[in-house]
Amino acid sequence: MEQQQGLHSGGYIPYGQQLSSVEKTTDKSQVEKEKSEDTRYSPSQSASPDSNSLEKQKSAFLDQEKRKREIDQFDQKEKEEESSSPVKKVIKIEAPPDLQEAARLDDHHFTAPLIANIHQAFDETISQNTEKEIKEGIIKTREDLIHFVFKSASELLNSPNPISTAAIENIHQLLFTPPLEDLSGKGLENVNLIQPHPAYVFQSLRNCLIAMDGKACASIADESAKYITSESVQKIFTIDSKSIDAIKREVTRLQEKSKLEGGLNAKDQSDLEDFQNFLNEIHEIHAKIDAFPVIGTRQYLQALGSLEAKNINHAYILRDSNSKEQWIFKPEISSFEDEATCNPSRLVEREHAASLVNIDGRFPIPKTVYVEMNGWTGSAQMFIDGAINMDRLDNAPVSRDGLHRLVIFDLLFSNEDRHSANILFKKESGSNVYAPYGIDHDSCMPKYGNALKLDYIALISQDEQFNQNLKPLVSEEALQEYAMEMKKKEMPESAISWMMVAGRKIREDMDTRSARTIIRDLMESWERGHDEDY
C-alpha cells in the first residue's frame, strides 16, 4: 500500500491527469485537431472512424457552405477579441446560437447521453450546476464534462449527508455505462484504501446491494446472527484451531497409510471417515457464513476463531456478491447506554467526521462514507483485507511516516480509544514494511471525556522525532481546514478548540522535542483540561 508522502498527494491521480492523453485545453487549434483525430470516447466507434462521419451528423442542421462562411465570420470576431485579451477561449456565449451549439456539443453522441445521465444520477442542484456551467462556458469540452462528473461524485462521498440507496444505483449507472464506462473501469485498478477513486466506491457499494438482493440489512443481520448462534454451529466453534489442525494432520496420516498398505483396518477406517465428516461439516458451516452479505463483526471474528470479540459494538461486515468483504458498517441505531463521553446518537457522526478531516489522504485512515443501505443509515469504512493486528507484528518494520501521521491524527482529534485492536497493519506493496491503518473512530472528538489512548506508543523509540516533512499536517491553514470539516458534522466546539491547541503545540515542538515527549505533554494536558495550560 503506497503511503502519501506530502500534504497534497492524492490516493488516485487527479481527475485531469486520469484522462491520460485527454488533456484540457483552451487552444483553438488543439480543439479542432481533437475533433478530427481523437474519437476514443465515441461509444459507437471501436475502430478508425469515417473521416466524413462528423460532417454527415452536422449536415442535418447546418448547410456545409453556410457553416463555412459563418465559422469564418466567427473566427474573425474571435481573433479580434482575443487580440485585446491574454485569455484564449474555445466558446463564447455571444456566438450565434447554432454555432454555439455546434462548438459546445461538437461531440454530440458523447455529451448528450452523458448530460441526460447526470440529470438522472445527481440531485437537482448538481443538475442545475451542470446546465449553468455549460451555458456560462465553464464546461467547454467533453473533458471538462468528464472532470465535472467525477468531481461531483467525489464531493458527494464527502458530503455530511447520507447517500441514499437510490443515489448509489443511479450514480453507478452514470459511471459504468457509456461513455464513462472505460474511464470508470480504470478507477477500479490499484485501489487505494485511504483515497479510492469514486468509481470504485460506488461500484463496491452497489455490489453489496446486489448481494443483499433487495432484503433489508436488519433482516439479513438477524438471519446471520441466528445461524451463527445456533447450537450446532456453536458446538463447532468450541473446538479450538489447534485441535482442528491436529485432526487435519491425522487425516493426512491415515490417507498416506492407506496408500502404503493398500487399505486400513476397521478402526482406522472408521476414524478417517469420522474426521473427514467433521472437517466437511466445518467447511459447510463456513461456506454458509461466508454467503451472508451482512454479518455482525462479533460473529465474524468468532467464525474466524478469534477470541478477541470483546468491546465490539454494533458493527457489521458488508460483503459483495462474491462473498468478499467490502465495508465495516455501523448503523445509527444502537443499544449502547448513554455515556458522558460519547452520546450514542453521535457515534456514526464521529466515524464519518474522522474521514472528512482526512483531506487529500493525509492520514492513514481508510475511506469512510455516510450511506443509507436497504433500511440502515450509517458509516461504512473500507475493509482492509489481509491486515494483522499489533499482537502479530512480531517486531516487523513499520512505516515511520505512516506511524507519525497516525499519532498526529490521534492527538489532533482526541482519540480516546486507540487500543491494540483499533490499529491494523498491512504490508506495503513490494516491501516487508508494514503500513499502519487506524480504524474505529467513534470515540474521537468528544465534548470531554477519558484519557487519550495510544496503545501503539511502544512502536516509537524514546528519542525518535516526528518527520519534519509532516509539518504541513499542522500548519495553520491545515488546522482551519480540519475545523471546517468538523463543523460540517457538528462536532463539539471544545473538540475543535483542542484540535487547534494540539496542532500548534505539535508544530512548535516537533523541531526540538521527541515525539514521545510531545505525546506525553499533550496527553497530560488533555487529562488536566487543556484550557489550564494553553
Image: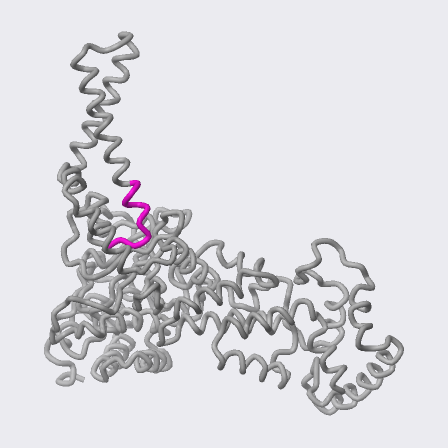
Q: Of all residues shown, which one is farthest toward the right?
A: 65
Measured as percent of width and height from the top left, residue 143 is found at 62, 70
Q: Nearer the viewer, residue 38 or 316?
A: 316
Residue at (62, 81) in percent of width and height = 134
Res. 453 image quadrant: bottom left
On-image quarter of the C terminus = bottom left
Total label count?
A: 0
Task: Residue at 43% x, 68% y: name it.
Answer: 166
Q: Is residue 471 visible?
A: no
Residue 353, percent across and down? Answer: 30, 73
Q: Does the stretch in magenta take in 293?
A: yes
390 over 514 or under it: above or below? above
Is 475 left or right of 80, judged from the image as shown?
A: left
The colour mode here is one colour
Q: Which residues are magenta?
A: 287-296
Q: Quadrant of the N terminus?
A: bottom left
Question: Is residue 421 part of the magenta span, yes or no?
Answer: no
Q: Pick whichever, 325 or 197, lies toward us.
A: 325
Name the residue at the top extreme.
261
Q: Residue at x 26, y 66 (%)?
A: 331
Residue 277's x, y, as percent?
Answer: 23, 27
Rendering quarter of residue 476: bottom left
Q: Is residue 72 visible?
A: yes
Residue 349 image position (x, y, % from top left):
27, 73
Residue occupying image coordinates x 43% and y 62%: 201
